Amino acid sequence: MAAHLSYGRVNLNILREAARKELREFLDKCAGSKAIVWDEYLTGPFGLIAQYSLLKEHEVEKMFTLKSGRLPAADVKNIIFFVRPRLELMDIIAENIISEDKMHSPRDFHILFVPRRSMLCEQRLKEQGVLASFINIDEYILDLIPYDGDLLSMEYESAFRECYLENDQTSLYHTAKGLMTLQALYGTIPQIYGKGECARHVANMMLRMKREFAGSQNQILPVFDTLLLLDRNVDLLTPLATQLTYEGLIDEVYGITNGYVKLPPEKFAQKKQGEASKDLPTEPKKLQLNSAEELYAEIRDKNFNAVGAALSKKAKIISAAFEERHNAKTVGEIKQFVSQLPHMQAARSSLANHTSVAELIKDITTSEAFFDNLTVEQEFMTGVETDKVNTYIEDCIAQKDPLIKILRLVSMQSVCNNGLKQKVFDYYRREILQTYGYEHILTLNNLEKAGLLKLQSNSRNNYPTIRKTLKLWMEDANEQNPNDISYVYSGYAPLSIRLTQVLARPGWRSIEEVLKMLPGPHFEERQQLPAGLHKKRQQGENRTTLVFFLGGVSYAEIAALRFLSQMEDSGMEYIIATTKLLNGTTWIKSLMDRPEAQTS
C-alpha cells in the first residue's frame, strides 16, 4: 500500500490499485517466465504504480531498456515490450525481433501499448514483417498516475506542444478517457466548469462518452463536487516565473522526475572521524519526494525564505526527543523510548537530508545572478518598462547565458505587455539568432505560434486590467505566515489559481469582463446524477474540486492550491490533475526545435 495516497479527502490508492490489477491480469496472460523490454520513458511512471516486487511475483525475471540491435541474452519464455505508440520505437522493436529470429530462439513475443493501441504502429510492424511474431497485442490504459495524496499527472510530455503547435488533440482524448476512468471509480462529477478551447473540447468529449455509456451508469456516491478544466494558455505567465517555494526551487534547480530528484553527492557524504575524505561518492544522491516523508510534507509548499526557520525548529524538537532517554528510568519508560527510536532516527536522517538540500538551494538563491533575474521578472509582472528592450536581457545575451533563460524572460516580457513592439521584437530576434545560431529560428516561430512571443497588435494591453481586477500583484506578501496565495512567487498570485479561487467564491459571474479578455470560451455544464446519489452535505463539510490543468502545471501552483485547501474559511478542498508536471525550463524545452536532435 502507498499510504501517502490515501491520507486526503479522496483515496487515490483506489486508482493505483485498479491500475495494478490490470497489470497483473496482462502479465498472467503470458504464461511462463518473462523479460520486459521497456520504453525508457515509461519506467518512471510505472515505478509509481508497481515496484519490481509485483513484477517478480508474476514471473518477470529480467528487465531491459529498449534499444536497437540485439536483445540481451535471457533464459525466458516470453519477451514483453512495454512501449508508447511511437513509430520510431516500432523500428527498434522490429530490429530486435529480426535479430532474435536469426538466432531461432523459441520465444513468445508480446507488445503492450501505453496508454493506447495504435493502428499506425501496427501497420509499421506489419511493413517490417514482424507483426505476425506477436502472440498478444494489447493496450494498458495508464492515463492518470497518482503522484501524491492530492496530485495526479498523465506525464504526457508533448501535450502542450501537440495542442498549440501541431493542432493534434490526442492528449485531449486521453484526458477525457482518464476523467471517465476517474468517474467510474469515484462517481459522476455533477458540475463541470472550464476556460479555454482545449477545456471545451475535453468537456464535449466527456459528455459524448457519457451519452454513449448511458446504460451502464455506476451507482457510486460522487466524491468530487466540481471539475474545473483550465487551459495552460489561459495563463502563460505563471510557468515562466521562477517558483519560490521549496519544492518549486528544487524543481527549478535540479529537476524533479517522477517524484525523485538527483542531487550532487558531495553534500551528502558521511565523513567518519579520522577518515580521509578522498573517497567522496560520485553517484548523484537520489531522493524521493512525496508526503510520505513527514518533514517534506511540512516544508515543501513553504516560501523558501521560511524553510530555514522551519528546519531549525524541527532540529530542536528532534534533539529534545533524543534527550528524553536520560529521563527514562523505569523499564517501561525505557521500553517506550526504544519503541520510538526508529521513527526518531528516520526523522533525524530526513532532517539531515533536507538541511543539505536547503543549503544547496540557498547557495543559488543568495547569488547576485538569481537576484538580478528575479528583479527583472518582478518588474515585468508589475508592468515596469515592459515596452522597450530590457538592458538585463541584453547583457545576458551578450554573456551568452543559457538560451532557455533568455527565452523565458523575453516570453515573460511579451506576455506582460500583450506582445512586443515591432522594433523590440526584431531586436531580440536578431540578437538571439546571431548569438545562439540561426537554427533557433524554428524555436522562435514555435514560441510565436504558442502565443508566448508575439507582435503587439493595435488592441489594448489588457494585462494591467487583469492584474488589478484579480489582484495578481500583492505588495509585501507575507512569506513566513502567508495569508494569500501570492507567497508562492513572493508577491505574484498565479492567475490560474486566482481563477480557481474566484470560482469557489464569489463565482465567475463577478469577473465576467476579465474572463472575456482571456483566451478561449468559459462555460459550465451539469451532469445528471442517478436518482438517490445526490450528496447530503453535513454541516461544515468541505466541497471537493478537481482542478485539471490541460498543458501542464508547476509545483508553485500546486502549493497555492494546497494553501487554499488549508485555509480555515475556504470550505473547499482541491485535488490537482494535469497532463504534465512542468517548470519554465522544461516547458520551453518542449517547444524547442533542435535540428541537431533531429538529424542525429
Image (cartoon, helix red, strand yellow):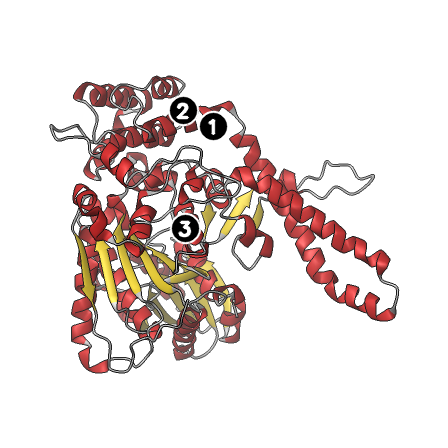
Q: Which numbered disc, 2 or 1, marks the residue that appears first in the sequence?
A: 1
Disc 3 + disc 2, Cβ < 8 Å: no
Left or right: 463 as drawn, with respect to 43: left
Q: Residue at x 32, y 46 (%)?
A: 498
Regarding residue 33, the answer to whether it shows in the image is yes
The residue lying toward the viewer, choosing from 77 and 540, is: 540
Task: Mark 2: give few (<14), some (14-19) or many (20+) Cα within 10 Å.
Answer: few
Give the SS element for disc 3: helix
What amino acid is labelled 2 in the image?
A: Asp
Q: Whole-percent x and y of residue 537?
A: 36, 72
Disc 2 + disc 1, Cβ < 8 Å: no
The residue at which mark 2 appears reads as 401
The residue at which mark 3 appears reads as 558
Mark 3 and mark 2: span between their CA atoms? 29 Å
Q: Whole-percent x and y of residue 424?
A: 23, 20
Give the SS element for disc 1: helix
Quarter of the figure with residue 391 = top left
Q: Residue at x 33, y 31 (%)?
A: 381
The residue lying toward the viewer, choosing from 275 and 389, is: 389
Quarter of the figure with residue 341 = bottom right
